[in-house]
Image: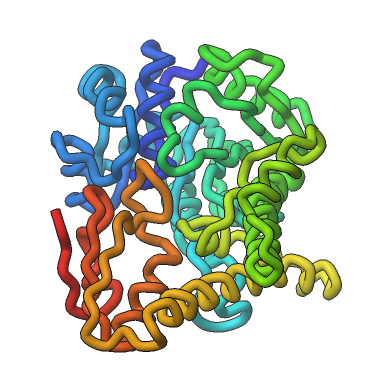
Amino acid sequence: MEVKKICCIGAGYVGGPTCSVIALKCPEITVTVVDRSPQRVAQWNSDSLPIYEPGLDEVVRKCRGKNLFFSTEIEKNIQEADIIFICVNTPTKTFGNGKGRAADLKYVEGAARMIADVAIGHKIVVEKSTVPVKAAESISNILQANLRESVSYQILSNPEFLSEGTAIEDLLNAERVLIGGEDSPAGHAAVAALSSVYMQWIPAEKIITTNTWSSELSKLAANAFLAQRISSINSLSAVCEATGADVSEVARAIGMDSRIGPKFLKASVGFGGSCFQKDILNLVYICECLNLMEVAAYWQQVININEYQKSRFSAKVIECLFNTVTDKRICILGFSFKKDTGDTGSRRLHVAKTLIDEGAYVHIYDPKAVTSTGAVLHAPLVILS
């Protein structure tokens, strides 16, 4: 199957950068990112993109209007596409069964229903959103329940492995591309079609193919392992402070062991961002549903250490200021959860809120991540620029 047109449902942190790079590397493919929000689409079509990623502006400028388009015409682009990416948000459920842990698939299922309503011909539907195991089955059930004559589907799992702040570099020089599909001739053909897109710039040996469920679980497992390393070094930071050891020296010593390596061994206030905590809680919930309670408890402890670390840090700040911060002015330099991103899903939010609750005046400086900070904290802040 020759891929000529790709439609991506969702113009967010995954869909926008991913499709921009595909358009850059596959000039013969027309790539259209669709979204229900006219405001978001307008931002993608402007000089002020809705997300900040180093290198993203340049890629979008090169391709936009040539073979990269951002549109609210969802039905038209679904009908014309050979491959449809589902790149929508999968937040943690805020009510009902699994509240606070399970992934809410309402946007994924909504995208599947839109496809089912208007699709014509054969479509390869690709879930790129981070989803629990067997989410592809939910998509398939929706598509099959609304199947019309002369319409057919193949469902693939193709999780993203992007880090905020390095997303464009991660896409251009991916360590691996993972594609999961059905073990059937039609499934293999769909995997081959999507692989042909990535092989325009990714070496074939870096494209891994698995069954659908392995692909879905691999994304959750990757984030869980990375968060686990952060919680591990943070737990040791408490031991170091109590004994006089230096956690940086300990991290360097163990990081030189080739079996361990140096990455994600920098002690901090804890992990933040929009992925790690959400995905681990989802993994915990899956384990509980499978009655794997010991496994669930193991991964829950990664979250518990993270919560402990941020509370411990806030207490240390107050302690070093003679146990009172009332009317004291405290400046936080940098408010995103890491450099080169505007994402304020940060442990600094907890620190700032704790200090404000204790009566401090908090001043925040971050060139990319302070737009909505005051609203998030529901408190008066001084934003420095």
Q: Quadrant of the N terminus?
A: top right
Name the image quarter holding residue 350.
bottom left
- Going 23% across and 57% down the picture, which residue do you hit? 365
- Residue 140 appears in the picture as rendered: no
Name the image quarter holding residue 124.
top right
**Picture layout, residue 130 above or below residue 106:** above
In the rendered image, residue 269, in percent from the top left (x then y), is placed at 51, 64
318 or 177, which lies in front?
318
- Going 42% across and 75% down the picture, which residue do you hit? 317
12 or 237, which lies in front?
237
- Going 57% across and 39% down the picture, which residue do you hit? 161
**Picture layout, residue 345 above or below residue 9:** below
- Residue 168 appears in the picture as rendered: yes
In the rendered image, residue 237, in percent from the top left (x then y), is placed at 64, 62
In the rendered image, residue 56, in percent from the top left (x then y), is placed at 31, 31
Q: Is residue 25 left or right of residue 64?
A: right
**Picture layout, residue 311 above or below residue 111:** below
